Image (spheres, coloured by chain):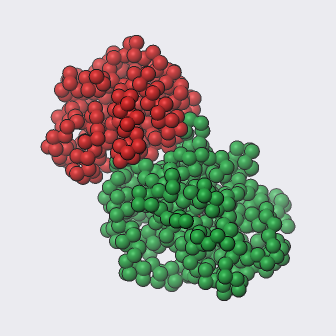
């Protein structure tokens, strides 16, 4: 089975590049060059050197013994939260800024939800001396304020987006509009495996470093050749595909993608695309999409800004259809509880997004000897306001 | 004969095409605006199908889309509203919108409805020429619906020729690298791009759109192509207070008269 994108930019029926003519030249330039650049020895050296010395890779695979006892299995945490800037997002921005440089671009734009991708983009722009503009929904600016301040300190201009639901989808629309208006000097660093081809494939390749490292680490830390499970949260799906990538063709490994259930599927206030969605087009890609009967994209809801997206990367729609990856979802409350549990049992405060992956541990019966890898996509610093609010209410004083 | 072809045969220059969003400012404004435009002397009308995420549109059209959706506009309702439009309106009518609502409606069903309603052409900015020609050309053709394709300043000559080859009706010349919105003047770079296209002697006529807001820009559009398309500036007008018919007729006559 082949899970790679085909020549035309599709994963089965999903993907493609549904873009207006005004974006054609930029997308074509990227499409014609990205593989060449990624395969170039100079790029590889620079990318791996920065991942090692700047980001701090490889990120550890940590055996969480108390959490393991709690769940009655063997749990290993892939610590993307320990990366510079605190999430997996920087694996992608390091790669894309090098691509932007090699294409001769000088102005960088990005969208952000939780602010992690915005921070990771602002960081590499500071590192490379490039101009950086980040589009962020007004709702997200309010709920992720520490990241907004960090981006500003890093020298980025943060533009508040007030259209639609004022979250990630709307920020992405605005970044696309900016790119249409600035086709020559600007490069768009997209933050997940979404958008028109070749972005989903490009970001997949850059994030695949997560599972590349896992392959060595699982052997070393668990003694088993393969994990039995890999669990990751999905917004657009970049940390999940990065965690799954090198195991896609290995059928012994069960791959679990956890979406944000919000207040529950039945409440309608959810971001669980695979349950609520059907194929449609969002941000230039044909993929599973939350929409009305009339084809209007609906506003998702999740407590976690990074998972609050009505679509999902086209590769995930394909993996879902092939049943290679199991998609499930957990609610806000389940995620919060899992975040507090990890904090108390292991001394690690996870991002709200990552807490969704952790919460799935409570929804499944594992064998004692199973090796279960959970990707901690980011750390919880940005979510402290939310956590404190729930702590003060006394709900999660475990 | 398709009404678009008839128009370009009968009128050689200064063709005025006007865009507005269906269901804006009121849910039932659509038909009244179409009639007012024809009476005021518009040559062609692009009726916008509102969409939640209009990625190629600027703030004015974004807001009209949001409003229209809040008002309850849907594609089904739009076809109902336009049911008897051909009893009165003779000028070419196009639908303009994004691909997702059309796909969810069903492309074949959409074309059938367009044909029954008397729609002459479609403009779908996020339907790329290649996907159109491979997947949708035959069904559009079956219903004699013209799919109007866009060219932009970034489009190479080679690509413009390729787009011309699969186009029918006319080519939508996007005036600048930008989303929709209004500008007071065209720059020298834009003018040289218009010249470039003019000198290519395409088989299809062209209309310049995006950024046309006043008489000055409309006249320039007419010098370098067969005419101009007005969107945001007109949407602003119908959003204003006062008598809709008077506002429309005044706006159109200001554009056309010296
Ligand atoms: C920590 C963290 N995890 C996960 C995500 C979700 O993105 P993706 O699904 O692309 O990994 C985000 C997005 O902002 C994030 O900040």
> What residue is drawn where x is 49% and y is 24%?
B79
B17 shown above or below A220: above
Q: Nearer the viewer, residue A134 or A293?
A: A293
> From where the camera sits, is residue B251 visible?
no
> What residue is drawn where x is 22% and y is 36%?
B204
Q: Which of A216 and A251 is in front in this view?
A: A251
Picture quarter containing residue A34?
bottom left
Chain drawn green, letter?
Answer: A
Q: Nearer the viewer, residue B235 or B241?
A: B235
> From where the camera sits, is residue A185 visible?
yes
Residue A395 lies left or right of residue B177; in this view the side is right
B107 shown above or below A43: above
* Spot occupied by residue A230 in the image (x, y as percentages of width and height): 67, 70
Image hue for chain B: red
> What residue is drawn where x is 44% and y is 69%?
A96
* Spot occupied by residue A243 in the image (x, y as percentages of width and height): 60, 71
Residue A64 lies left or right of residue A98; in this view the side is right
B92 shown above or below A229: above
* Spot occupied by residue A202 in the image (x, y as percentages of width and height): 46, 66
* Spot occupied by residue B52 in the image (x, y as percentages of width and height): 52, 40
A270 shown above or below A11: above
Outermost residue on the front side: it is A1
Residue A313 lies left or right of residue B167; in this view the side is right
Outermost residue on the top side: it is B87
């Amino acid at each position: 089975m082949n899970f790679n994108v085909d020549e035309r930019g599709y994963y089965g029926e999903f993907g493609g590049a549904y873009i207006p003519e005004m974006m054609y030249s930029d997308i074509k330039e990227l499409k014609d060059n990205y593989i060449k650049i990624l395969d170039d020895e100079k790029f590889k050296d620079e990318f791996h050197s920065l991942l090692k010395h700047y980001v701090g890779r490889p990120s550890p695979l940590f055996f969480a013994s108390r959490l393991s006892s709690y769940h009655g299995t063997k749990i290993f945490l892939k610590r993307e939260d320990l990366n510079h800037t605190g999430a997996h997002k920087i694996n992608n921005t390091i790669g894309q800024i090098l691509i932007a440089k090699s294409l001769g671009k000088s102005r960088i734009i990005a969208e952000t939800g939780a602010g992690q991708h915005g921070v990771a983009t602002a960081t590499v722009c500071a590192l490379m001396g490039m101009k950086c503009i980040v589009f962020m929904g007004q709702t997200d600016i309010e709920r992720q304020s520490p990241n907004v301040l960090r981006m500003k300190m890093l020298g980025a201009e943060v533009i508040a987006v007030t259209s639609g639901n004022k979250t990630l989808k709307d920020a992405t629309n605005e970044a696309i509009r900016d790119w249409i208006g600035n086709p020559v000097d600007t490069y768009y660093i997209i933050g997940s495996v979404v958008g028109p081809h070749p972005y989903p494939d490009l970001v997949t390749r850059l994030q695949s470093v997560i599972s590349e490292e896992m392959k060595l680490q699982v052997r070393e830390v668990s003694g088993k050749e393969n994990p039995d499970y890999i669990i990751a949260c999905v917004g657009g799906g970049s940390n999940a595909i990065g965690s799954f990538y090198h195991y896609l063709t290995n059928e012994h490994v069960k791959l679990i993608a956890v979406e944000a259930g919000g207040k529950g599927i039945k409440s309608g206030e959810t971001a669980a695309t695979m349950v609520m969605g059907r194929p449609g087009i969002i941000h230039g890609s044909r993929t599973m999409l939350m929409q009305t009967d009339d084809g209007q994209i609906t506003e998702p809801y999740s407590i976690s800004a990074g998972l609050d997206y009505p679509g999902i990367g086209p590769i995930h729609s394909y993996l879902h259809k092939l049943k290679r990856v199991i998609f499930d979802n957990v609610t806000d409350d389940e995620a919060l509880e899992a975040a507090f549990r990890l904090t108390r049992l292991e001394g690690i405060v996870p991002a709200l997004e990552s807490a969704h992956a952790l919460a799935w541990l409570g929804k499944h019966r594992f064998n004692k000897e199973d090796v279960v890898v959970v990707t901690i996509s980011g750390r919880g610093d940005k979510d402290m306001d939310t956590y404190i609010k729930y702590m003060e209410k006394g709900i999660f004083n475990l | 004969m398709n009404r678009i072809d008839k128009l370009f045969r009968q009128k050689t220059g200064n063709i005025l095409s006007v865009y507005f969003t269906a269901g804006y400012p009121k849910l039932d404004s659509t038909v009244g605006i179409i009639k007012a435009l024809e009476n005021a002397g518009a040559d062609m009308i692009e009726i916008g199908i509102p969409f939640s995420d209009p990625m190629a549109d600027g703030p004015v059209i974004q807001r009209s889309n949001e409003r229209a959706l809040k008002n309850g506009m849907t594609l089904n309702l739009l076809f109902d509203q336009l049911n008897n439009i051909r009893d009165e309106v003779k000028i070419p009518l196009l639908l303009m919108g994004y691909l997702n609502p059309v796909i969810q409606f069903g492309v074949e069903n959409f074309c059938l409805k367009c044909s029954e309603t008397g729609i002459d052409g479609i403009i779908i900015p996020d339907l790329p020429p290649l996907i159109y020609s491979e997947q949708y050309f035959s069904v559009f053709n079956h219903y004699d619906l013209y799919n109007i394709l866009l060219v932009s300043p970034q489009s190479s000559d080679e690509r413009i020729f390729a787009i011309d080859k699969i186009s029918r009706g006319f080519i939508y010349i996007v005036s600048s690298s930008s989303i929709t919105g209004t500008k007071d003047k065209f720059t020298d770079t834009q003018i040289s791009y218009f010249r470039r296209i003019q000198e290519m002697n395409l088989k299809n006529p062209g209309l310049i759109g995006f950024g046309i807001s006043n008489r000055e820009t409309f006249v320039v559009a007419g010098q370098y192509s067969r005419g101009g398309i007005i969107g945001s500036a007109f949407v602003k007008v119908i959003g204003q207070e006062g008598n809709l018919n008077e506002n429309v007729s005044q706006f159109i006559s200001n554009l056309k008269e010296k």
